[in-house]
Amino acid sequence: IVCHVMYLFAEFDDAANLLAANPDATTISIDEPVEIPKNQHSHLQEPGREEDDELLGTDDSDKTELLAGQKKSAPFWTFEYYQTFFDVDTYQVLDRIKGSVFPVPGKNFVRLYIRSNPDLYGPFWICATLVFTIAVSGNLSNFFIHLGKPTYHYVPEFRKVSIAATTIYAYAWLVPLALWGFLMWRNSKVMNIVSYSFLEIVCVYGYSLFIYIPTAILWIIPQKVVRWVLVVFSLCLSGSVLVMTFWPAVRDDNRRIAVATVAAILLLHALLAVGCLAYFFDAPELDIPAPIIPAHNGTTVITKSH
Amino acid sequence: FPGLADVSISQDIPVEGEITVPVGSHSPDEDYSTLDEPVKDTIMRDLKAVGKKFVHVMYPRKSSALLRDWDLWGPLVLCVSLALMLQGGSADSKDDGGPQFAEVFVIIWFGAVVITLNSKLLGGTISFFQSLCVLGYCVMPLTVAMLVCRLVLLAGAGTVSFIIRLIVVGAMFAWSTLGEFWLWGGCEGCAAPRFLADSQPPNRKALVVYPIFLFYFVISWMILTFTPQ
């Protein structure tokens, strides 16, 4: 019951603060926001921080920790513990996907959509779909590019599926792990207002990969310009989701470290996209008349330029 | 209990009865141990059960109580035959060819286990092995498609054969997925007992059905892209 009440009240930032202070109290839904003195972090509040409220939803790590502790109460060796990570309905998953594809400027993905209910369904199945989409699209694209050549013999290239799976799952799990460790380490040195649990970071990364699924399908088009425009476009969308999520978490830190962290996040994301494009999709051939190179034994060898 | 106030049980009326515990799913009306029956009977009974399930998958009828008695023989036979038929594909180098036997096997079984775990984690109440049984048996239309593809490829490997194979694989993929969807999700107007459908929480049916769709799509892709040497 507490979990459902929490879900309803997450919209009202101040009411949520009230509940965090006293989780067992029954509360009544009120339509207008209630003004409650923010006494938890008042020593960190500055006049220039009002825009935080909209971005963060006036969240604080205390509330998240308290809720997290209440939700996952089953011991980790029982099945029920893992069921708490799949406590989402269809419309929630669809909402989260929508939120990752159409990032609202100024709104934090984690606070707006995940609201202390991180799920593993989205990250896992989005990664699985992405793996197979990239493998199938790459195969199809190579088929169409090389179609018509007399020496071309179609191969299914099934080995690439395992490579794609390893890469994408490693990215979706190891990078959040590293980022979470890094944020925890910085949290111990600098007091941050916002901190995320490991599962929330995994969730953000998993849902941010969704935009690559339609991108991979469109990469079948054998035009270099189209492919690179798609890369930039999808990178902007999913990168902005990541930046808007993690910038509040590192902003309080040393300026250089904050910028370096966000830059590293974006760089890894770009590397994934460009790497997948380069490895799974052959370059479309250019129609330039090939130079004729006389070989040593007198026969001419025609080479095609890529 | 006012009506029972003057009921008394005399001491010399014997109280007797029978307590029976259902033995198992196979033959509840047998009163002798199956250890004593001839081996032929045992094998024939299991073979008949498997055969009935094959027929039921191809022509689903109203009573889906058949799948309550799960067995994994059918899925094993289907998986092995599909993996064997996917062998012999062409490859320029070892890395570029079609899936190896072990890869097909792992994809089918590991995929089925992951889908079952997914549905159980989302709150489904279906038994683990029942779900594996249903997923395995619904691979049958795709195995038939693979057989047809291999026969078509014997005739030739041109565009016409590709179109035929595409149509056959597409139809069998739709059959498998719709069969699964019918069993898992049910349909509103169907009178069939949807015991699998009722075991899923109502707001999460799409979340449960999508991985099944992905699973059969991958198997169909492997079948469609099979090219002989």
Image (cartoon, helix red, strand yellow):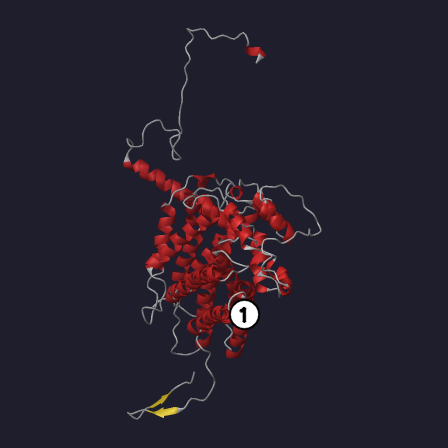
- Between B103 and B43, the one nearer to me in the picture: B103
> Within 10 angstroms of label 1, few (less than 14), some, or many (20 or more) residues?
many
Residue at the outermost right position: A32
- Please tell me whether mark 1 sits on a helix, a strand or a loop: helix
Residue at image coords 55%, 49%: B204
Instruction: Name the residue type under label 1.
Output: Ser
**A89 w.r.t. A211: above or below:** above
- Between B93 and A115, the one nearer to me in the picture: A115
Viewed as shown, does residue B191 lie left or right of B42?
Answer: right
- Between A167 and B55, the one nearer to me in the picture: A167
Viewed as shown, does residue A54 lie left or right of A212?
Answer: right
Residue at the outermost front position: A43
Q: Position of residue B40 (x, y in %)?
A: 29, 37
Q: Splitting the image into 4 quarters, where does residue A282 fall?
A: bottom left
Residue at image coords 54%, 65%: A252
Residue at image coords 54%, 47%: B185
Q: Splitting the image into 4 quarters, where does residue B19 fall?
A: top left
Q: Position of residue A77 (x, y in %)?
A: 40, 45
Q: Quadrant of the C terminus of chain B?
A: bottom left
Q: Position of residue B54 (x, y in %)?
A: 42, 46
Is residue B183 visible in the rendered structure shown here? no
Q: How many marks?
A: 1
Q: Position of residue A7 (x, y in %)?
A: 60, 49
Q: Which residue is mark 1?
A: A234
**B17 w.r.t. B71: above or below:** above
Residue at image coords 54%, 59%: A194
Is residue A284 visible in the rendered structure shown here? yes
Q: Quadrant of the N terminus of chain B?
A: top right
